[in-house]
Image (cartoon, helix red, strand yellow):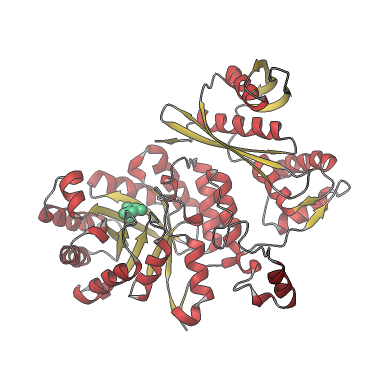
Amino acid sequence: MSEKIIIFDTTLRDGEQSPGASLGAEAKLKIAGQLAKLKVDVIEAGFPASSPGDLLSVRTIAEKTKGPVIAALARCIKKDIDLAVQALEPAVKKRLHIFLATSAIHRKYKLRKAKQEILRLAVESVKYGRRFCDDVEFSPEDASRTEPDYLCQVVEAVIEAGATVVNIPDTVGYATPVEFGKLIMTIKSNVPNIEEAVLSVHCHDDLGLATSNSLSAVENGARQVECTINGIGERAGNASLEEMVMILKTREDYFGFRTGIKTKEIYPASRLVTTLTGIHVQPNKAIVGDNAFKHEAGIHQDGVLKEKRTYEIMSPESIGLKESRLVLGKHSGRHAFGKRLEGLGYKLSEKDMLKAFERFKRLADKKKEIYDEDLTAIIEDEISVVPETFKLVYVHTTSGSQTIPTATVRLKKEGKIFQDAACGDGPVDAAYKTIDKITGLGAELVDYSLRAVTSGKDALGEVTVRIRKGKKVSIGIGTSTDIIEASAKAYVNAANKMGRGSSLAL
Ligand code: KIV
Ligand code: ZN
């Protein structure tokens, strides 16, 4: 049997550092649940010292997510380690992830510390961490730009101090595949105690090489890969989990490695992360992009019809992508609706089921054919993890080439109705100005995007907005067959998130 590569998912820590990604505690717990279903080996749940909210969210994940090892990040600071230990306390399997930069540029400008001081801090922190946790990972940040001799010295010392995993980050995505592979090989051959720890890599995608660099590392001795769903993460992101896993699966013949990932859960994980972070996947993204399994050229379509493998190196089903199916219509009952949701992997409470069914009926009045994608959009929109402080009750706009765009909006908060009207540059702007008047939000709209959930003129429109107020950014999503309504819902959703402080402080 081929050797196993450990999949360490950092969607909830590095992924959440994506500009504009804002995940509240409930959203993080939901993602952690999906990562457990995906059977990742390790979930890095957060960085407890970064905020009390993050500590609480790591602790909740540690308490409620069963299966994977739960990891928490900490700097080489006692207080950080103590907070990470506190957050990990309820986990059945736990890992402390301690990091400290080692490169000359970080030593000189960021840390203002000499090599020996850094070595001492790293060793002391690992020893301290081992007092509370049997599994301690150490990352020499910016390892790929660190002098190899010094890097090997640090790696040897932290293993000696008790590190069970040593992770080599290409923090700024500077390395190239052959070069990074050689660095891993250098560590393997020059660190005498390297076999006492698992060698891991953590690659960023600034030059689009994160997955290639991770693969090259695996070919040269790394046995753990750190990655994120949809490749989200700091700046250009991290190595994408779906790419790493599907490369190793599709080309097991070449690489001779396997992972424990349940690949059919990849697509649901990708959708969930998109919905909850508001960060869309580019259509041509490998594995999970909208076009990844679409054949446009006639010759290709002909080939696929005759034999799928002519143009498909992996099947859409293998990542959990089901053919878009016409599922239900106006006359479908609650039982059929519930069964289909079950088939899509949703287990709803009685109350949520009722809410979703009512929404489905309203949609069925407007849209003749309802597909799986429509149902997913309804559930993701209706059964939001964000409690609705404000709920959109009514929106009416007038606009045209000779009219001043005007909106009237009615919102509900704690049973009370609030109504107002405003003019704007267009109907969406008018609606947003009205919502601002009612909620007193006064945020800046920094991004707005609209996509059709399915094809056809009666398709559901999904609007994603990103709003900013001071240093806080929040993302909202709304769906409707009416794009003005979808736009208003998305804005109210973002406003609700902003209000409860689940947004990311930049
Ligand atoms: O990119 C990086 O170096 C990191 C470390 C904390 C592992 O995210
Ligand atoms: Zn990183």
Decide if residue 40 is on the left or right side of residue 320.
Answer: left
Give the image location of residue 469, x and y in percent. 46, 27
Relative image position of residue 404 (x, y in whole percent) = 69, 17
Q: How many marks?
A: 0
Q: Quadrant of the C terminus?
A: top left
**435 vs 269, nearest the viewer:** 435
Specify the quadrant of the image occupied by residue 495.
top right
Q: Is residue 11 visible?
A: yes
Give the image location of residue 159, x and y in percent.
22, 66
- Residue 349 position in % (x across, y down): 69, 46
Occupied quadrant, residue 257? bottom left
- Determine the residue positioned at 78% across, 39% down: 358
Camera sees residue 198: no
Q: Is residue 370 left or right of residue 465?
A: right
Name the residue rendered at 48%, 42% in the picture: 21
On screen, residue 2 above or below 160 = below
Is residue 495 placed above or below 97 in the rendered structure? above
Farthest residue in the bottom direction?
1
Q: Is residue 470 above or below residue 160?
A: above
Q: Can you name the residue that lies furthest to the right here?
A: 331
In the image, taking residue 345 as reference, residue 340 lies left or right, namely: right
